[in-house]
Image: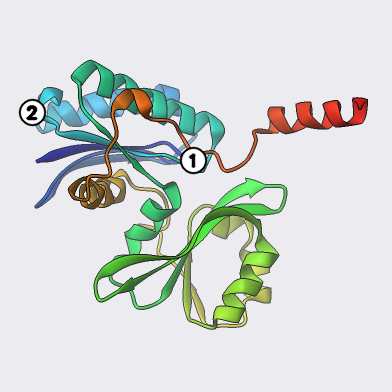
Amino acid sequence: MKILALDSSGLVASVAIVTEDAMLAEYTVNYKKTHSQTLLPMLNEIVKMVEINLEEVDAIAVAAGPGSFTGLRIGSATAKGLGLALNKPIISVPTLDGLAYNLYGTDKLICPLMDARRNQVYTGLYEFEGGEFKTVKEQVAIEVEALLEEINRIGREVIFLGDGTAVYKEMIEEKTKVAFHFAPIHLNRQRAGAIGALGMELYHKNAQEEAWKHEPVYLRLSQAERERAEKLDSAN
């Protein structure tokens, strides 16, 4: 079977086509482009390169959130549109799960970080136990200091990855009391290949949905929605 995978949840735009045995293609860009400019041209390029008709795809896996509100909407709309046009199911892969899956097989605690601004990150905690991917802490929006306190309480060696590591590196180095590492550059950002690989596992667990039902997961209100709520509160 073949899965088309999309990730535009953060600064990176990434598209991949995976099978149960191999990643046929992956196109990832992390350079000053908006996802509305890049995602569909990238998809068209890998489809041409591997000489595949999109109707051959069995499902569409997408990083479903949390992440950038604009990026999530673009990825969700692209996946949903393709799913409806091709009559294919959607596999919603939690963004932080997909990011953590980059580090398959490590015996360390995995902590992906996406900058959520306001001194917060989108994060979760994960591990591999006997080759099985497990969630230690469900993805959440949380203050960085509170997250590091929790990691210190758990007391396990940890690997950090994601765009939040660069933003909060000094705080991580100062406040993390357990042994820690930062993932290398080829594994420290979102990759559609990881979304596709994890999506394949979810597909075999019947975790797909009809395209029209798919919605991204934001975890918190957008800035515009927060400002509107604040204005309503002050008016009352």
Label 1 is placed on what type of residue?
Leu
Mark 2 — residue? 51
Q: Is mark 1 on a helix, strand or loop?
A: loop
**Residue at left 57%, top 74%?**
151
Q: Is residue 222 above or below residue 87?
A: below
- The reply to whether callout 1 and callout 2 are in contact (CB within 8 Å) is no
Residue 38 is situated, as x and y percent measured from the top left of the image, at 38, 27
Residue 190 is situated, as x and y percent measured from the top left of the image, at 40, 48
Q: Is residue 178 left or right of residue 76?
A: right
Mark number displayed over residue 23: none
Mark 1 — residue? 11
Q: In this view, does 150 lie above or below 80?
A: below
Instruction: Look at the image and tell me in which quarter the C terminus lies.
Output: top right
Instruction: Look at the image and tell me in which quarter the N terminus lies.
Output: top left
Q: Is mark 2 on a helix, strand or loop?
A: loop
Q: Can residue 112 be seen in this view?
A: no
Q: In this view, does 15 lie above or below 157?
A: above
Distance from disc 1 to disc 2, alpha carbons, whole Å, reads 28 Å
Q: Is residue 46 left or right of residue 226?
A: left
Number of other residues with Cα within 10 Å of mark 1, as a class: few under 14, some 14 to 19, many 20 or more? many
Specify the quadrant of the image occupied by residue 196: top left
Residue 174 is situated, as x and y percent measured from the top left of the image, at 68, 75
